[in-house]
Image (cartoon, rainbow, N blue to C red):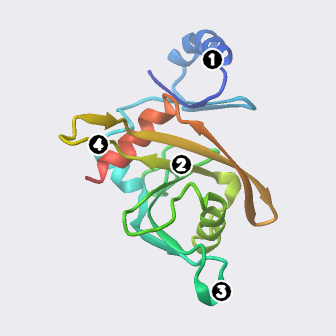
């Protein structure tokens, strides 16, 4: 029995659910999905779901994405980023149903004058519309690769993954809130990002 807790917001609930249901699920031959407002647990029998071939099959978009700004002819607010979209509910490979199956990962590129953080709401709104993604089924993540600095490049800024939560007003994302991505979701996102290389 392999247990993957995809989104755990409460360690107390996580421990409780694991202890109470693990013995029951060990005797059960069926896949089970348990949904709790503060916790999503996915229990799966079978091989590791984070292997590279599985991760690559989830990738549906991986390219430089350019967005139009709000400055009209002056192109104020326009920029570009690296955009990756993963759909964990791909029909050919999905074995379970996810509440938020679409994982969108954005990262800065040198060619863009604007950062993904400074335009988070605007980018999210456009991506949702252009790729026909329902925001209720999406997780938005900003990825910052490791950087080195200094005269001999000895100093490092470690890589970082931030989850961004938006308030949605009709079809527009507003009021972004950032929080560090934590295991086990962090481990899954890292596997998705690294699998394409």
**Going 59% across and 58% down the picture, which residue do you hit?**
118
How far apart in space, not on screen, are marks 1 and 4 (Cα)?
36 Å
Circle 3: is it few (<14), some (14-19), or many (20+) Cα within 10 Å? few
Q: Which residue is mark 3?
A: 72
Q: Which residue is mark 4?
A: 149
- In the image shown, does 172 or 146 lie closer to the viewer? 146
Q: Is residue 107 visible?
A: yes
How far apart in space, not on screen, are marks 3 and 2 (Cα)?
28 Å
Do the residues under discs 4 and 3 have CB atoms within 8 angstroms? no
Q: Secondary structure at mark 4?
A: strand
- In the image shown, does 138 or 68 lie closer to the viewer? 68
How far apart in space, not on screen, are marks 1 and 3 (Cα)?
48 Å
How far apart in space, not on screen, are marks 1 and 2 (Cα)?
22 Å
Q: Is residue 96 visible?
A: no
- In the image shown, does 174 or 36 lie closer to the viewer? 174
Q: Which residue is mark 1?
A: 11
């Amino acid at each position: 029995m392999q247990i993957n807790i995809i989104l755990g917001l409460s360690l107390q609930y996580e421990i409780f659910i694991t202890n109470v249901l693990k013995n029951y699920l060990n005797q059960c031959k069926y896949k089970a999905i348990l949904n709790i407002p503060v916790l999503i647990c996915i229990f799966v029998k079978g091989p590791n779901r984070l292997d590279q071939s599985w991760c690559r099959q989830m990738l549906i978009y991986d390219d430089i994405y350019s967005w139009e700004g709000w400055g009209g002819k002056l192109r104020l607010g326009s920029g570009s980023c690296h955009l990756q979209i993963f759909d964990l509910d791909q029909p050919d490979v999905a074995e379970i149903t996810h509440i938020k199956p679409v994982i969108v990962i954005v990262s800065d590129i040198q060619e863009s004058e604007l950062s993904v953080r400074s335009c988070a709401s605007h980018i999210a709104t456009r991506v949702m519309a252009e790729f026909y993604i329902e925001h209720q089924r999406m997780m938005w993540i900003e990825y910052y690769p490791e950087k080195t600095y200094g005269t001999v490049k000895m100093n490092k800024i470690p890589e970082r993954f931030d989850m961004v939560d938006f308030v949605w007003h009709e079809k527009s994302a507003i009021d972004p809130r950032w929080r560090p991505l934590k295991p086990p979701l962090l481990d899954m996102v890292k596997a998705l990002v690294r699998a394409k290389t």
